[in-house]
Amino acid sequence: MAAGKGMDRRDFLSRLTAAAVGGVVWGGFVTEGKSAALVLRPPGAIPEQDFLGKCIKCGICVEACPYDTLSLAGPGTDAPTGTPLMIPRDVPCYLCTDIPCTVECPTGALEISLVSDDGGRTLDVNKTRIGLAVMDYENCIAAWGLACDACYRVCPLLDKAITIEHTRNERTGRHAVLLPKVHADVCTGCGLCERACVVEKAAIFVLPREVALGRVGNNYVKGWEEGDEGRIDGSTGPADEMDSNPLDYLNSGDLDDD
Amino acid sequence: MMTSLRNNRFLIARRLVQTAVMVLLIGGNLWGWTVLRGNLSSSIVLGVVPLADPFAVLQLLAAGGLLATDVLIGATITLVFYALLGGRVFCAWVCPMNAVTDLANRLGRRFKTGTGSRRVFGRPARYFILALALVLSAVLGVAAFEAISPIGMLQRGLVFGMGAGWFAVTAVFLFDLLIQRNGFCGHVCPLGAFYALVGRAALLRIEHDHNKCTECMDCLTVCPENQILALVGQASGSVNDGVCTNCGRCIEVCPDAALSFSHRKHAMSLESGGS
């Protein structure tokens, strides 16, 4: 018998205010909690904002993982509480060919079609894009000229996701530098390289692709790549928004000096 | 000994069910048991039957997620089960937070705390919080209550590791103990409010026999939602309000056997109160 008869306007307004304040605080808390850009999600995860709207936090992916790679974010950590994540330096993803984490996800936050060919019929774990391995050449001892190819050797897509580039060692003048190079179009972000890196804090590490990669935009077209022009078909640019043809300017008379 | 068991038979049964559910879930994570895998948000029974928290699914749908069929089927199964049995059976028999708030409220009765003159939340507050959860989910694109739910933190924590989740559980405990008796489960929790709405037509109900009642009012003392026991001392009939959790505590404490579990009966006028 709270709301209802005995409620005057003052009472009603104070409750309305309480509800509004509560809603704002609650909303702010939730917004604050979902702004974690550096979290690595399991294989097959849809883009982060959609992921947060679909993950029900059941932990079935965590249980499905045979390597204990995944864990659920606890309250008070960077990631939204209860969502699954991996920390490759602790346990990387070993890219199971049957991808149990993705297959068992009940909500579609982990989407099978993203890690399979022909729309979900054949699983292809190499299509996994957990993130992208990024090099810090300042602290890579191979870049110093020392002999280390730990990341290259451990990569499950050996010689495809990481290749070794031979360059001249300018310091000694007589040796080679065997430089690891990551290829973003192949790298799955599994993190075996990050796990294997021999230096104290890994000089190769996985970042979410949204963080690691830039974006060219549509104004540059690779004319030497077949079909790349297709990207700008149907796109609108400033020229489409003009009222008249820019070439008409030449006939407008504005060019006359006198 | 036997009387004490008998006087707590539903309480013991509830703790056993709550513990069994959590142990099965924990076993699913730690030891690979397949009976029940996942957690209370969504799970798989014997690797076949999906179950899901229908309120969490509703929030995800409000957030705009086009969900896979597994979780929709799971939510439907759970929803139908509780709609038939008695919505808030979840609260009293499954939810692990129930043990926490029961303890807080029992201590509150013993030490006479949690009944300050000014109530923080009214009983209907939970329905507004429920509505707010859905609105915020739609606006923010995230399941809003799941993001802050102390129940979620507790049940997930039990299965996957508590972390800082103890803070939330302790907060609920202290709120119920010191600030408002039955505050969380009976006034705030939108999941309880959701199941109260779901269970409005449920079949399992508490029945009151006015002819046996001696009006000791012990049932009202222990009932976490005692506003629904208005018929006690007034008339015979079944307690049809959806907020009844079917915990059975009133039956246990009644010295006159005037209360019992029964199926739903309409209105309070089946048997007019013997005057």
Image: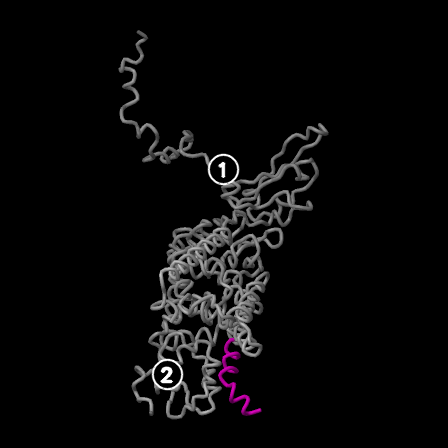
Q: Are marks 1 and 2 on the same chain?
A: no
The CA distance from mark 1 to mark 2 is 68 Å
Secondary structure under badge 1? loop
Give the residue type that dot 2 points to: Leu
Q: Residue at x 31, y 12 (%)?
A: A255
| Residue B205 left/right relative to A79 | left
> Are there few (<14), some (14-19), or many (20+) residues within 10 Å of tag 1?
few
Q: Give the percent coordinates (x, y) of residue B149.
A: 49, 63
Q: Which mark is residue A72?
A: none
| Residue B199 left/right relative to B26 | left
Q: Residue at x 52, y 82 (%)?
A: B12
Indicate how the structure is coloured in the image.
Answer: one colour
Q: Give the percent coordinates (x, y) of residue B72.
A: 38, 64
Q: Is B104 one of the magenta-colored residues?
A: no
Majority secondary structure in the magenta region: helix
Disc 1 vs disc 2: which is toward the camera?
2
Q: Quadrant of residue B270?
A: bottom left
Q: Residue at x 45, y 92 (%)?
A: B256
Q: Give the vertical position of B111 relative to A9 (above or below).
A: below
Which chain is home to disc 1?
A: A
Mark yes or no: residue B246 visible: yes
Secondary structure under badge 2? loop
Q: Which residue is mark 1?
A: A214
Q: Which residue is mark 2?
A: B231
Give the residue type that dot 1 points to: Gly
Q: Give the percent coordinates (x, y) of residue A39.
A: 54, 50
Which chain is home to disc 2?
A: B
Q: Is B13 one of the magenta-colored residues?
A: yes
Q: Give the percent coordinates (x, y) of residue A129.
A: 49, 48
Q: Nearer the viewer, residue A28 or A38?
A: A28
Please state the extent of the stretch shown in magenta in the rendering.
Answer: B1-18
Q: Nearer the viewer, residue A75 or B273?
A: B273
